[in-house]
Amino acid sequence: MSLTITGRHLEITPAIREYVHTKTARVLRHFDQVIDTQVMLSIEPLKHTAEITMRLRGKDLHCEASDDNLYAAIDLLVDKADRQVLKYKSKAQTYAHEPAKRLDIHAE
């Protein structure tokens, strides 16, 4: 998985980069088929916003979270992304059933 972190009106420090990297690793525990991840962090007066776009096979997931604190916004963002990935994983999961021809039917 490639992780791109971009800052808007913000310089990305090594501490922020490490925090985002450890938090997004949580999503990979549930689903390891993430192709690309882009994180956009922005600061406006009294509002810190974090956005994430995850490219999965066949789908792009996008989340956005805002808070007064940048680290809290990242935490909210990762929670939303984790829920979306779990939802995608449950929908994409194949449920193979035994074909009707192979079922043992007792003829009476």
Image (cartoon, rainbow, N blue to C red):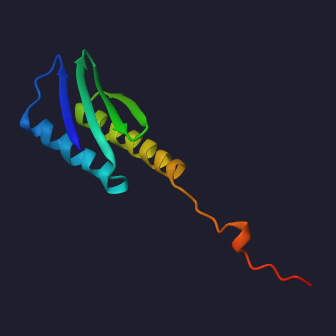
- Residue nearer the viewer, 58 or 100: 100
Quarter of the image for residue 42 reads top left
| Image-based side of 46 in relation to 87, left or right | left
Q: Residue furthest front?
A: 101
Quarter of the image for residue 70 reads top left
Say which residue appears at 25% left-offset and 26% top-offset: 40
Say which residue appears at 92% left-offset and 84% top-offset: 108
Quarter of the image for residue 43 reads top left
Q: Residue 72's spot in the image, x, y percent?
A: 29, 37
Residue 8's place in the image compared with 33, above or below, is: above
Say which residue appears at 30% left-offset and 33% top-offset: 73
- Work out which quarter of the rendered image holds the N terminus and state it: top left
Say which residue appears at 32% left-offset and 44% top-offset: 34
| Image-based side of 38 in relation to 62, left or right | left
The total number of labels drawn is 0
| Image-based side of 99 in relation to 95, left or right | right
Residue 13's place in the image compared with 24, above or below, is: above
Residue 88's place in the image compared with 100, above or below, is: above
Q: Residue 64's spot in the image, x, y percent?
A: 37, 28
Q: Residue 45's spot in the image, x, y percent?
A: 25, 15
| Image-based side of 7 in relation to 64, left or right | left
